């Protein structure tokens, strides 16, 4: 599992909440009547702030992020929206059980589905088709993201998509090797082995020497 699709910086950006300017925050963080009604069902300052931020982040990028990665500027902005005075962003916390429950509510509100086994099967089918055309892994990754967005499926963490890509490419490779094994005679296999052996006294494949 050594295939690196995104750089470390790209991975961090993909797995982190969007970095918003002041104007972007005002444009995206709109506290409407529907959201207000939903928040009334949530008790406690941390829980209300957490729910609203999960709601906003999902609206922007169709993803959920661990509460510990929520940006302090966003926490402070939402606290002021909710008229929660003197709230310290560094003290914000949200338990896993509540996070999971709020996630289900938000998915239902937006008419989206979680990244589950059905979503992985969908990606597997897409990736397998792309693998037959020898598409680069990064292009495959971006196509997977586009497919999930179009199908209104929650975008998971980078590694979740990467692992499906790796497993599918492995399946495709095994399939190709099996087809070759079925098509080649023992004589053909022996000839290929010979071509892939080194020339006498040289670190050069015999097949390579035929190209020159």
Image (cartoon, rainbow, N blue to C red):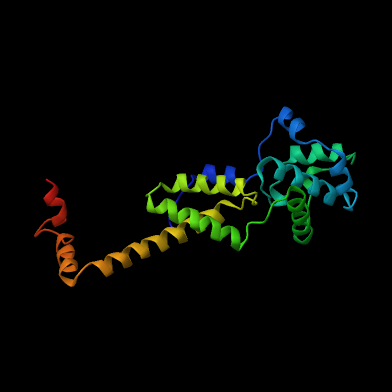
Residue at 15% from the left image edge and 60% from the top image edge:
195
Q: What is the residue that sits farthest to the left in this orientation?
A: 200
Residue 80 versus residue 94 in the image, above or below: above
- Quadrant of the snapshot with the N terminus: bottom left
> How many numbered circles does the render carry?
0
Q: What is the residue that sits farthest to the bottom in this orientation?
A: 186
Task: Locate residue 156, reporting x and y percent.
Answer: 61, 53
211 or 178: nearer the eye?
178
Task: Give the quarter of the image for residue 61.
Answer: top right
1 or 185: nearer the eye?
185
- Quadrant of the snapshot with the C terminus: top left
Task: Locate residue 45, reporting x and y percent.
Answer: 87, 48
- Would residue 180 be found to the left or right of residue 97 on screen? left
- Would residue 92 be found to the left or right of residue 180 on screen? right
Inspect this view and state whether residue 204 appears: no
Inspect this view and state whether residue 90 appears: yes
Task: Give the quarter of the image for residue 121.
Answer: bottom right
Residue at 15% from the left image edge and 55% from the top image edge:
207
187 or 64: nearer the eye?
187
58 or 127: nearer the eye?
127
Residue at 79% from the left image edge and 58% from the top image edge:
98
Task: Locate residue 119, reporting x and y percent.
Answer: 59, 58
- Would residue 53 be found to the left or right of residue 131 on screen? right
Task: Locate residue 203, reporting x and y percent.
Answer: 16, 55
Task: Give the quarter of the image for residue 18.
Answer: top right
- Would residue 13 be found to the left or right of residue 199 on screen? right
Residue at 64% from the left image edge and 52% from the top image edge:
153
């Amino acid at each position: 599992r050594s295939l690196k699709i995104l750089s470390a910086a790209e991975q961090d950006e993909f797995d982190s909440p969007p970095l918003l300017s002041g104007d972007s925050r005002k444009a995206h963080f709109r506290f409407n009547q529907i959201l207000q009604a939903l928040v009334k069902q949530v008790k406690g300052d941390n829980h209300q702030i957490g729910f609203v931020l999960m709601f906003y982040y999902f609206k922007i990028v169709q993803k959920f992020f661990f509460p510990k990665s929520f940006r302090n500027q966003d926490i402070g902005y939402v606290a002021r929206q909710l008229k929660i005075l003197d709230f310290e962003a560094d003290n914000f916390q949200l338990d896993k059980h509540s996070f999971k429950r709020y996630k289900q509510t938000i998915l239902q509100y937006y008419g989206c589905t979680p990244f589950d086994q059905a979503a992985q099967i969908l990606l597997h089918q897409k990736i397998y088709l792309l693998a037959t055309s020898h598409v680069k892994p990064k292009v495959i990754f971006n196509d997977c993201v586009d497919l999930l967005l179009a199908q209104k499926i929650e975008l998971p963490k980078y590694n979740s998509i990467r692992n499906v890509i790796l497993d599918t490419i492995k399946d495709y490779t095994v399939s190709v090797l099996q087809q070759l094994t079925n098509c080649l005679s023992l004589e053909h296999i022996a000839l290929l082995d010979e071509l892939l052996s080194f020339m006498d006294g040289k670190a050069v494949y015999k097949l390579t020497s035929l190209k020159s």
